[in-house]
Amino acid sequence: MRAAGNAFEQRACEELERAGLKLLARNYTTRHGELDLVMRDGGTVVFVEVRYRIRSGFGDAVMSITAAKQAKLVRTAQLWLAAHPKYAQQACRFDVVTYDGPRDSAKMEWLRNAFEAE
């Protein structure tokens, strides 16, 4: 499943770059969690979570971003900002990019500002 995750992260990165975002980091990992993509959208740092679900038996991909997952993403984003102080004063947001359905026909859904850091 990791190979599929990597493929969809790459796909999302390319789509977001076409939309004008610039890649800052990929797969930033700490003991608290991982940031799939860290991008810049103008003056805003964007932390992007990429999700793929082939079947919706447990809900679609966006439903897998639970409150606990959000908390991990926020904590990991704080650590990334601490490690990259030149971005620490910029606006930030959390986007979620989802793909649902069979791999070849999965359509991208981009949820800008999908949740707020508490």
Image (cartoon, rainbow, N blue to C red):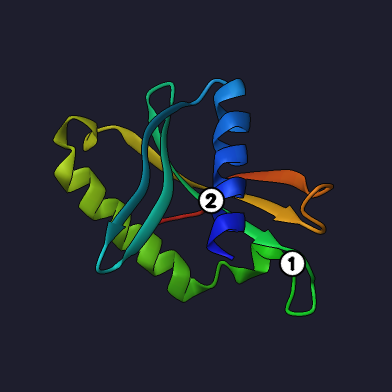
Q: Quarter of the image for the N terminus: give it.
A: bottom right
Image side of residue 96 versus residue 77, left or right: right
Q: Disc number at residue 6?
A: 2
- For the residue labelled by badge 2, is the local secondary structure a helix, a strand or a loop? helix
Residue nearest the observer in this picture, 8 or 48: 8
Element carrying mark 1: loop
Determine the residue positioned at 24% across, 68% down: 31
Q: Position of residue 22 (x, y in %)?
A: 44, 25
Read off the residue under disc 1.
60
Amino acid identity at mark 1: Asp
Horizontal relation, residue 18 to residue 42: left or right: right
Amino acid carrying mark 2 in the image: Asn
Residue found at the very far bottom of the displayed protein: 58
**Where is residue 24 drawn, in percent x and y?**
35, 32
Q: Is residue 118 visible?
A: no
Camera-side residue: 71 or 37?
Answer: 37
Q: Earlier in the sequence, mark 2 or mark 1?
A: 2
Residue density around tag 1, few if under 14, some if 14–19, many if 20 or more, within 10 Å = some
